[in-house]
Image (tube, rainbow, N blue to C red):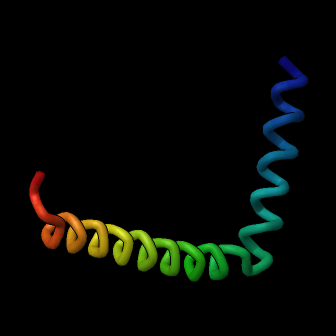
Amino acid sequence: MAGWAVTFLIVALVAAMLAFGGVPGLAVSVARVMFAMALAAAALTGLIALLRKPR
């Protein structure tokens, strides 16, 4: 049980270091770019499906 406590303590310390180090701002920027790319891919796929001739 003490092993789990130490593991979670280490995970919490790493998360705190990342959170206070400015990584969340970078993560938000990356998430916005990935969302825009996924939205563009979905729109392109929908457009291709509409323009494609039925078989």
Question: Is 30 placed above or below 49 here?
Answer: below
Question: Is 13 placed above or below 26 here?
Answer: above
Q: Position of residue 18 (x, y in %)?
A: 78, 67
Q: Position of residue 44 (x, y in %)?
A: 30, 74
Q: Residue drawn 85% across and 35% down?
A: 7
Q: Position of residue 42 (x, y in %)?
A: 31, 68
For this view, does 38 lie left or right of residue 30? Answer: left
Q: Looking at the rendering, which quadrant does residue 21 occupy?
A: bottom right
Q: Residue furthest left?
A: 54
Q: Residue drawn 45% across and 76% down?
A: 37
Q: Looking at the rendering, which quadrant does residue 47 occupy?
A: bottom left
Q: Residue drawn 15% across and 72% down?
A: 51
Which one is in front, 14 or 2? 14
Q: Residue furthest top?
A: 1
| Number of numbered discs overlaid on the protein picture | 0
For this view, does 36 lie left or right of residue 21? Answer: left
For this view, does 33 lie left or right of residue 53? Answer: right
Q: Residue drawn 83% across and 17% down?
A: 1
Which one is in front, 33 or 9? 33
Which one is in front, 19 or 54? 54
